[in-house]
Image (spheres, grey):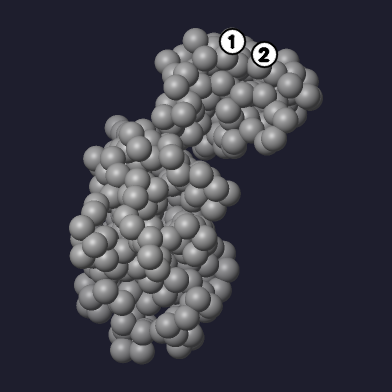
Amino acid sequence: MTPADLSLTVLRAVRRAVDENALHAPVPARVRVERTRPGGRGDYASAVALQLAGPAALSAREVAEILRERVAGAPGIGRVEITGPGFLNFTLDGSADAYGALMSRVREQGPRYGHGDALAGDLLRFSHASEVRAAVTADAVGRLARAQGARVHIGCDGAPDPDWARLGIAGDGEDPSATEIRPVPAGATAGELLRRLGPDATRWGLLRPAGHDRAPLGDDLLVQGEGNALFLVRYAHSRVHALTRGAELLGFTSASGQEAPGIAGAEADALLALLADHPAALVAAARHRAPDRLARHLEAVARALLDFHDVASPLPVGDEKPSAAHRSRLALAEAAGTVLAGGLSLLGISAPRHL
């Protein structure tokens, strides 16, 4: 069981408790699980019971007990304990293989890792103003919702701008009954932004801020430096492909998922945790109609990947020979690159292999 699997298992337990009237509280969009801190119990812990205690009008320990009964015995979970004011602590069966299973899943699913059925069967109707930021945001929301199984109809309440096609936007026609998507307007036309920034920087500049915030659309979106989040994410992705090419020249490839637990270190743990959280991040971005959540998640993955690379190079350094450790590190880097590529695609932004 991966951390993402555990998060979904606990979320299903919450939903079941609510459906059975054992718990009267809103079901959260996601449940966060974290590695147990030194001295703690089990492999992972969650504070979800503390989060639900107020709305449920129960103590956190009472909520934790309700959830423990519904999680205990689930496949992959060996033991569930309650500690402190109401923390749930999980000991997994075969926990040493959890990260290896995660990377195997990323390798198998590729850029579609994190796509799921959270919105399966839903027909979502959105409309937006005849304005570039509203159009780009609605398009990204549609991509995220479709990745979770929803059927989506997107309409415009005015005349579409012909330049939107260069941003990958195709509307379905006006729909008066649809939910409106109304971010703060960009203050410029699509043509103006495209001439100055190009399609990728335009989309990132419009989607990265939350919809209620103004979108900074200056020329710094084109700067090739770590201060530009778009460059950081795309550079991290291209760096992974450079590592793969370097490994091929040295005569080795990345490890299979089963070898992944050999990776150790705080930087590796931080990166692995973000990769495990990717499916939940996609679901949250889709449910809340917030592409900015995905953009921030990709930034975090990129920074964690570069931090990991700096302390544990996937390629031999100096007189080193390729080893199992290098193969495992390369597998982790490639998994991160896959997540970055898939996330950028959902935002409608290209992920170049060379930058």
Nearer to me, 44 or 176: 44
Left or right side of 164 for 177: right
Query: Where does residue 205 sit, x and y in percent of width and height?
Result: 44, 74
Q: Which of the labelled discs sits on residue 69, or is there none? A: 1
The residue that appears at 59% across and 10% down in the rendered structure is 69
Where disc 2 sits, the SS reads helix
Left or right side of 139 for 95: right
Image-quadrant location for residue 243:
bottom left
The residue that appears at 50% across and 76% down in the rendered structure is 226
Query: Where does residue 122 sit, x and y in percent of width and height?
Result: 33, 36
Count the labels in the image. 2
Q: Residue furthest front?
A: 319
The residue that appears at 37% across and 77% down in the rendered structure is 201
Where disc 1 sits, the SS reads helix
For badge 1, the amino acid type reads: Glu
Query: Where does residue 223 sit, x and y in percent of width and height?
Result: 44, 85
Viewer can see residue 195: yes
75 above or below 140?
A: above
Query: Where does residue 89 sit, x and y in percent of width and height?
Result: 63, 23
Q: Residues within 10 Å of mark 2 (few under 14, many from 20)?
A: some
Nearer to me, 74 or 191: 74
For badge 2, the amino acid type reads: Glu
Quadrant placement of the C terminus: bottom left
Q: Residues within 10 Å of mark 1 (few under 14, many from 20)?
A: few
Contact check, label 1 and label 2, Cβ < 8 Å:
yes
Residue linked to disc 2: 65
147 above or below 303?
A: above
Q: CA distance from mark 1 to mark 2?
A: 6 Å
Quadrant placement of the N terminus: top left
Q: Which of the labelled discs sits on residue 139, or is there none? A: none
